[in-house]
Amino acid sequence: MVSDVQGGRMFEVTGPVMTDAGMQVLWNPEGFASVVDYDSWEGSLLKDDDILQHVLVGVLVPINLGDSAFQFVVRVGDSQQAADLTTRERTRLVVASEPYLITSAGSLYLSGLEDVSAIPDEKALHVVAPAGRYAVTVNLIDWESEPDSRALTGDPSPCALPDFVLLLTAPTWPEPAFRQSLQTLPPPP
C-alpha cells in the first residue's frame, strides 16, 4: 500500500517482504544495472564482502535477520518534513540502527536479497524517493506487545503495527558517520 502522508511531501509504502537469501534489503536499482541473470547476481551479491561494497557506496541497506518474512513500513521525508515514527511506533520501539546511506534517482526497492536486479521483480516494494541522498534508520517494533495486535485466528490484526519501520530522511550537515556493516541492528537493550 502506498500513501502520500498528510498530502505533503512525505511518502509511505507498506507491505510484507520475505527472503530465502538471508536478508531483506532496501536498494537503488541504478546500482545494479549489470545484474541481469543469476551469474551476474552471484558475481555482485553472493559474498558478504561484495554486499558490503554496495553498502559502502550507498546503493543498498541490509536488514540482515536471516531467512524470514516481516511486515515493513518505509517512510520517506525530505528537507521540509522529516520522516519519523508515529507515537504508537515510538512506544513499541525495541531498537533502531545507526543511519545507513542510500542514494536515489527517484525510486528505491525493498525486497529479499535474491530479488535484487536491473529489473525489479513485482514482489519488491516500490519506494518513491525523490533524487538525492538519504540517511536510513531501521527500527524494530514490538508490535505483539500492543493489546489487540492479533486477531482471534492468531494472525496480526488489521490495525497491528509493522515489524519494521524504515525512515529515510535528508542527512544533516555535516553528514553523520554512516553505518558500514552488514549487522543491521545492535543487540536489544
Image (cartoon, rainbow, N blue to C red):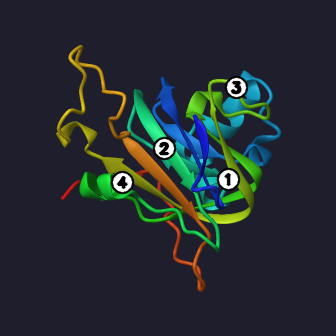
Q: CA distance from mark 4 to mark 3?
A: 26 Å
Residue 52 in the image, given as x and y percentages of width and height: 57, 52
Image quarter of the N terminus: top right
- Give amino acid for label 1: Val
The residue under the point 48% across, 29% down is 16
Q: Residue furthest front?
A: 7
Q: Does 11 appear above or below 116?
A: below
Q: Which residue is mark 3?
A: 121
- Give amino acid for label 4: Leu
Q: CA distance from mark 1 to mark 2?
A: 19 Å
Of callouts 1 and 2, the N-terminal one: 1
Q: Which residue is mark 4?
A: 185
Q: CA distance from mark 2 to mark 4?
A: 17 Å
Given contact means CB atoms under 8 Å apart, are the residues at marks 3 and 1 in contact?
no
Quarter-wise, where is residue 160 in the image?
top left
What secondary structure is marked by label 4? loop
Q: Which residue is mark 2?
A: 73
What secondary structure is marked by label 1? loop
Circle 1 Cα neighbour tier, 10 Å, few/some/many (<14 / 14–19 / ≥20): many
Given contact means CB atoms under 8 Å apart, are the residues at marks 2 and 4 in contact?
no
Specify the label residue 59 is tagged with. Answer: 1
Of callouts 2 and 4, the N-terminal one: 2
